[in-house]
Amino acid sequence: MNYELIKVCGMREADNIREVEALGIDMMGFIFWPHSSRRVTEHPGYLPTQVRRVGVFVDEAPATVLQLASSYRLDLIQLHGHESPTYIQNLRRQAGSALNHSIKIIKAISIGSSSDVEQYKPYEDCADYLLFDTRCTTVGGSGKQFDWSVLSAYHGDTPFLLSGGIGPDDAERVKAFCHPRCIGIDLNSRFETALGLKDIAKLKTFIETLQR
């Protein structure tokens, strides 16, 4: 895969944020879903300046999303619940007047089988990016992978990120994955030493392998 970007999600510790940012990634995710074990409960004390900031929300009230987008100067909003296209269109319209900067939207799609890929269709005209993640009993962060080959059923035009249980030993597999609309990967739980704390050495080795 000729990836364009790497997103590391589930960040919340200032020193760890600085170290991950220094690896030269492209996006950093902050989870604001109240039920997540990686939820940002207070300001980390440092936010990245060299990467794009992504806020992750699950069926959240638009007013709360916009308030946090403003407070954290988010560049992207990732919606990981059952948000409808109408919700996204309204959120985008409200963001245009509430924020002093433009913001893009990622819509996550949970994949368990090839039929789940079809869920993308209603979001073609309202999301800037899609994120294909593993279907699980909770919302992401399961550390489990889905069968990437089912994404051959994706024929949309919206670029997407590959997510779901990508780990330190998957660099070569990621490099071998090919889809014309895949522009990057999302890394989280399998690079952790503790909840919300990323293993810098493993991330560095993984990224270096991708770039060879």
Image: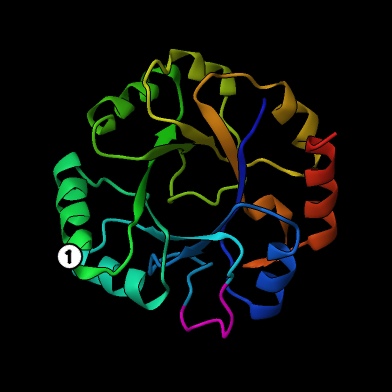
Viewer-closest of 137 and 158:
158
Identified at 56% across, 62% down, the residue is 10
- In reply to whether residue 45 is colored magenta, the answer given is yes
Please state, as top left, top right, bottom left or bottom right, where the C terminus lies in the image: top right
Q: Is residue 112 left or right of residue 17?
A: left
Residue 38, percent across and down?
53, 67
Secondary structure beneath dot 1 equals helix
Viewer-closest of 59 and 137:
59
Identified at 54% across, 28% down, the residue is 182
Residue 97, percent across and down?
17, 65
Identified at 61% across, 64% down, the residue is 50
Q: Is residue 110 left or right of residue 163?
A: left
Compared to 84, does 79 lie above or below? below
Compared to 94, does 71 lie above or below? below
Q: Identify the amino acid type marked 1.
A: Ser
Figure quadrant of residue 154: top left
Compared to 44, does 33 lie above or below? above
Viewer-closest of 38 and 162:
162
Q: Is residue 169 left or right of residue 152?
A: right
Residue 198, percent across and down?
71, 63
Q: Which residue is mark 1?
A: 97
Q: Is residue 46 left or right of residue 69?
A: right
Give the prevailing secondary structure in the magenta stretch. loop
Viewer-closest of 131 and 90:
90
Stretch of the chain drawn in magenta: 41-47
